[in-house]
Amino acid sequence: MDLKLLDQTLANRGEPRFRARQVWAWAAKGVHGYEQMTNIPSALREELERELPFSSLRLREERHASDGTVKALFETADGRPLEAVLMRYRAGRRSICVSSQSGCPLTCTFCATGQMRFARNLTASEIVEQALHFRRVEPVDHCVFMGMGEPMLNLDNVLEACERLPDVGITHRRTAISTVGWIPGIERLAEQEMPLRLALSLHAADEALRSELMPVNERYPLRDVIDSCRAFYERKRRRVFVEYVMLAGINDRYEQALALAKLLAVRAPARPVRPPAGPRADTRGLGSPTAREAQIFKVNLIPYNPTGSPYEGSTRESIAAFRAVLEQQGIEATVRLTRGRDIDAACGQLAARASN
C-alpha cells in the first residue's frame, strides 16, 4: 500500500497515529486485505477499503519455473511495468529480487532491462509492495536489489524501502544493493547506519571492454569505482560482492581472470596480517598477504542467460577454469546458481513482457 497516503488518509479522518502502525503491522505479516485486520474497527476498515487501495501495484501476470522460482509482472497506478522474482532454495532460504525503477536508463548491452524504454523511479511503497506480494505467499528472509533499474539512481526511495524490510522478515544484513558503479550512490550507502550489503556489477577488468559492455564506465571509470568500493569496506567492514557475467570469447579468457584478480587485490593491508604461531600452525589457504587482503571482495561468476543480445554464454569448463585462476590468486569466487531461466526470471532477463 502507499504508506504516505495511508498516513494522510488516517490523519484526515482524525485517527490516532498508532492506527497507521497497526495497519502496517498487518500488511507486513502478509495479510491479503483490510478485512483480516481484526484489531482495526470495522467501520475504519470499510472506509480504508473505499479510499485506499490495499496494494500500490497491480499484478498483471505470475509465472512459475520448474525450480520453484516465481516471477511477478506488475503495473503501477500510472501504467508503468516492472518485475520482481521469488527464489526458493533447498536449505529453506527464500530470497526476493526487487526492482527499483521501471526500465533502466543505463543501457548495459547484455541486459534485457537495458533494452527497455526507461519509465521512472519507483516509489518506496512500490518497492516494498514487491516484497509484500511474496510475503503473502510465504515468509521471505533475503532481498537483493538486482531487478530492473539502477538502485543508486533512486537511492532515497530504496533506502526508505529498506527501513521497512525488517518488518517483513528481511534484516538489513540480508539485504544487498547492486550498482553498475554509480560512485555517488556507493559513497552515500557507506554513510548509512543500516548494515546493508553492496554488490558491484563489474563484468570486465579493463576500461575499454567495460565501456563497451557498460557505457556508464565512461562516466565513472573502473579504477575509481573499485576505490569507492574499498572505501565502502573501510567504513562498513562488509565485503563487497562483485558480479561478473560470463560471456564466451568476450570476458572469460585466462588473462582476463588474471586482470580481474589484480584489479581486486588491495594495495595495502587494512590491518596487519600476523602468521599463525607455532611450528605446526596450519597456513593452508593463507597464501601471500595480498591474497589475504583481497577478501574485501568476493566474486560471483554468473552464467549468461539469453536476453536477445548478440552474446553467448561461456561453457561450464570455461567458467570453472576462470574461477580456478581467481582462487589461485587469492580471490574467493563462486558460480551463481541459475534460477528461473525457463520463465525469463534469471539474472539479466527481466524485461517486463507478458508471456504469449
Image (spheres, grey):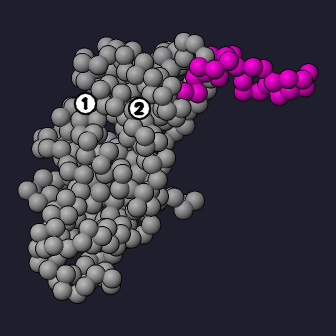
Quadrant in the picture for residue 248: top left
Q: Main secondary structure of the magenta part?
A: loop
Name the residue located 47 percent from the left edge and 22 percent from the top edge: 230
Locate residue 324, reporting x and y percent: 60, 27
Residue positioned most to the left: 78
Q: Is residue 278 magenta?
A: yes
Horizontal relation, residue 294 to residue 37: left or right: right
The amino acid beneath tag 1 is: Thr
Q: On the rendered image, what quadrant is the N terminus found in? A: bottom left
The crowd level at tag 1 (other Cα within 10 Å; few <14, some 14-19, many 20+) is some
Three-letter residue code for mark 2: Ala
Q: Is residue 74 visible?
A: no
Instruction: Count residues near mark 2 (Cα–Cα under 10 Å), then give few for <14, some for 14-19, many for 20+.
Output: many
Label 2, on which residue? Answer: 190
For marks 1 and 2, the one nearer the N-term is 1
Provide the residue designation for mark 1.
Answer: 109
Say whether residue 192 is left or right of residue 99.
right
Nearer to me, 78 or 8:
8
Q: Secondary structure at mark 1?
A: loop
Q: Can you tell which of label 1 and label 2 is closer to the viewer?
A: 2
Highlighted range, magenta: 270-298
Q: Quadrant of residue 215?
A: top left
Residue shown at 45% from the left, 48% from the top: 172
Rendered residue at 86%/26% (across/down) = 281
Task: Estimate the spatial distance between the alpha carbons at disc 1 and disc 2, rounded to whole Å.
Answer: 28 Å
